[in-house]
Image (spheres, rainbow, N blue to C red):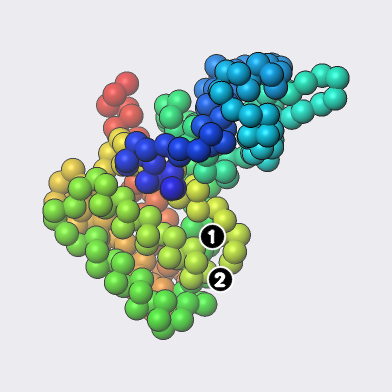
Amino acid sequence: MGLLETTITGKKRGSSHAHVVAELGSAIVSGRIPEGSILPGDTELSMRFGVSRTVLREAMKTLAAKRLIEAKAKVGTRALPRSNWNFFDPDVLGWRCDVGVDLSFIEHLAEMRLALEPAAAAAAALRASSDDIVALYAIAAKFDDPKHTPESIAKVDLEFHLAIARMSGNPFMRSASALIEAALAISFRLSSPAASPEKIDEVATNHLRIAHAIASRDPDKAVAAMRHVIDVGRTRIHKTLEGDE
């Protein structure tokens, strides 16, 4: 289950391993477990979560892979500073979003999207097959529905952007998809374009412009169209956050 789906449904993963990872990971990212602090020992954590040492060990390996913790002999397991965290990891991004977003976080996310997605659109314009383009137009057509809910339009949005990442032919682009999901999850929570038919129409038009640019094999237009979509979404979220403040 991806970050966007988790945000929409509110469902969490159910295994013992996933529960331990989520509880400890969320506690570290939220600051409930301070950066640099030493975590309780295996015996205490096993009892706290009601899991075997084998499950706990696997959970700790998962958190270490996300660069949230580091185990050292004779020292224990330490919560790493946020400068070490893997923010490309979907879980880490999800826990960060759960803490609450601010303008700084929105800007950092938008900067990364602007660095990656216009390049993906340009690559798609050069590399996409005819079947890829037909499929992209089919996804773009799904935006044009005035009955969209925040949930349904967010799912179409994610499908569209992931399709372009895949069409780029660059595996690194597809691996960075957690950033796209995080941005759309935030949009779903704060300022969905499904709020009005006019905004839905604007989103449909802007995404169709990206599809047209890719279909015409024009990387420059694809870059401009993608940048515009990201900027519009960022501005919409800024207005919501500034209004709350």
Q: Which residue does the image show at 49% across and 63% down from the upper left?
A: 165
Residue 132: mark in rendering:
none
First-in-chain label (2 vs 1) = 2
Between 168 and 150, the residue placed more toward the observer is: 150
Residue carrying label 1: 174
Q: Quadrant of the C terminus?
A: top left
Tell whether 25 sits left or right of 11: right
The kind of residue tagged 2 is Gly
Q: Alpha-carbon neighbours of circle 1 within 10 Å: few (<14), some, or many (≥20)?
A: some
Q: Which residue does the image show at 42% across and 37% down from the upper left?
A: 12
Q: Is residue 100 above or below residue 136?
A: above
Quadrant of res 205:
bottom left
Q: Alpha-carbon neighbours of circle 2 within 10 Å: few (<14), some, or many (≥20)?
A: some
Q: How far apart, in angstroms, are the residues tagged by discs 2 and 1?
A: 9 Å
Report helix, strand or loop for mark 2: loop
Report helix, strand or loop for mark 1: helix
Quadrant of res 217:
bottom left
Tell whether 193 sits left or right of 119: left
Tell whether 203 sits left or right of 228: left
Q: Which residue does the image show at 57% across and 33% down from the upper left?
A: 21
Residue 79, percent from left and from top:
68, 24
Q: Is residue 36 above or below residue 139?
A: above
Q: Is residue 46 above or below residue 15?
A: above
The kind of residue tagged 1 is Arg
Residue carrying label 2: 169
Tell me if I can see residue 45 in this picture.
yes
